[in-house]
Image (tube, rainbow, N blue to C red):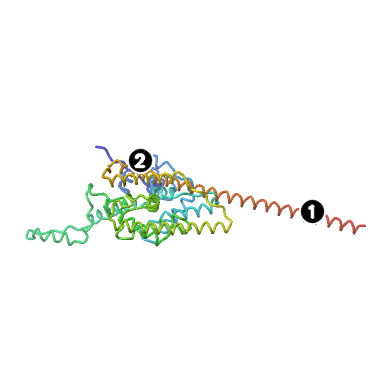
Amino acid sequence: MAVARHHLTIHEKNQLRVYHRERPDLTQEQLREWVHAHFGKWIGRSTIGKIASQPEEVCANPTAKRIQSGRYPEMEAELYAFVMSKDDEESLHSEQAIMSEGLLWTKANEILMRTRGPTQSVSLGWVQRFKKRHGLHRSQKAGKNVEMAQDLGLETITETVPVTFDDSSSVGEKRRLEVDEPDLSLIAPSKKAAVAPKTTPGRKQFVSADDILLLTQVLITKPWAYPQLMDGWQEVCEQLREHSAFNLEKTAGACQARMLLLLDHLRAGNVAALRKSGTSEEYERKRELLVEVQAKQTAFEEFQDDLRKRRGDPALPSTVTQHEAAVAKVGRVAAAIAVKEATGEADLDGQRRLELLEMKMERELAEQRRYADEQVRQLERLQRAQLEAQQSQHAQLLATIQQQQATMLDLIKSVAAQSKKD
């Protein structure tokens, strides 16, 4: 039977090094037994010797088992300290204590702006990897909570004083006392049951009712009006999670992609996809909400374009690419399927082809968003470079003028001195 491998965290390794430094005469076997007594882990003797001989490690997350240095270790350490300070202010193990990706992204870029200048920035993908690296994901915190509950249950069983009964006690009385005993309310589950319980249904896909809730919240929040677009979508996502009828665990990016997909179906006239998994009343309501969202978003974009033209700012690069061609293609396939349904010739292949085209369109839409973001960043970098060049030219011109003034002043002084001599 294979023996489970144990790994010490960075904090536990440092404790072992301190203990070994204070008692250098201990053998590896004695250190191994000390580790098991304090941490409940059996580590190999060679591993114990290797850990004890290395210097102490400094990591932003001491509960990690190894150091993973990213591109910006100083910024990452400061960001982790910021997260820990927020966790101290709020509840450590509640879902509300898990900071949003938009807030972490904004704080990370603020730190980079302060430490490395405006040329460095991180993406939302980096924020997701940061949360996974430091155990800040919702699933990771849920796993820690389950482990804490199990540990608490084991401690409760250890500290409970056993109740003894004489022969006259009935079995029913024993059971009643066991149920009423408050210290036995946290019984450690068996190994087969030691998994995090699912608090939400297994459904992972949007249905018409979810689409209606999403579109209603989008109209209330208006994420397109936020300075940072993903901050708006993060607010939409958090509001949906608080809604009792919304039982999906979706991220801000997933909610944004779903709304854009629905808008694409509306533009392409894809009635079959919009009507899918819902009643006729839900379809009509969804269509009304989509038309209203499209109108408000278009009006906001036109207002921003007009404001940009008045200020003389350069126009943003156009994102009209093969994504719109994919939208049109989905519309043609949907129309063909609708015709087949009307004539009774619909088949599963057509539905499958439509679903594949929808998935392809989602991927292309995500790629186009990344390309548009990159174009915007390049435009911002170009503007900063032009501004720095203008400032450099102004500084050089100012230095030249000051030098000429100094030369003229020296000339005037020399002429004045010469006239006095004469």
**193 to the left or right of 101:** left
Quarter of the image with the N terminus is top left
Q: Residues within 10 Å of mark 2 (few under 14, many from 20)?
A: some
Of the pair 163 and 262, the residue shown nearer to us: 262
Tag 2's secondary structure?
helix
Residue 23 is at least partly visible in this image: no
Q: Quadrant of residue 69?
A: top left
Residue 185 is at least partly visible in this image: yes
Q: Position of residue 355 (x, y in %)?
A: 33, 44
**Residue 326's disc number:** none
Number of numbered discs on residues: 2
Tag 1's secondary structure?
helix
Q: Position of residue 39 (x, y in %)?
A: 32, 48
Q: In the rendered structure, which amino acid carries the disc numbered 1?
A: Thr
Q: Position of residue 142 (x, y in %)?
A: 32, 53
**190 to the left or right of 45:** left
In the displayed structure, 26 sits above or below 212; it is: above
Distance from Cα at disc 2 to Cα at disc 1: 78 Å
Q: Quadrant of residue 102?
A: bottom left
Q: In the rendered structure, which amino acid carries the disc numbered 2?
A: Gln
**Residue 407's disc number:** 1
Q: Residues within 10 Å of mark 1 (few under 14, many from 20)?
A: few
Q: Earlier in the sequence, mark 2 or mark 1?
A: 2
Report the residue marked by disc 2.
Answer: 28
Of the pair 61 and 115, the residue shown nearer to us: 115
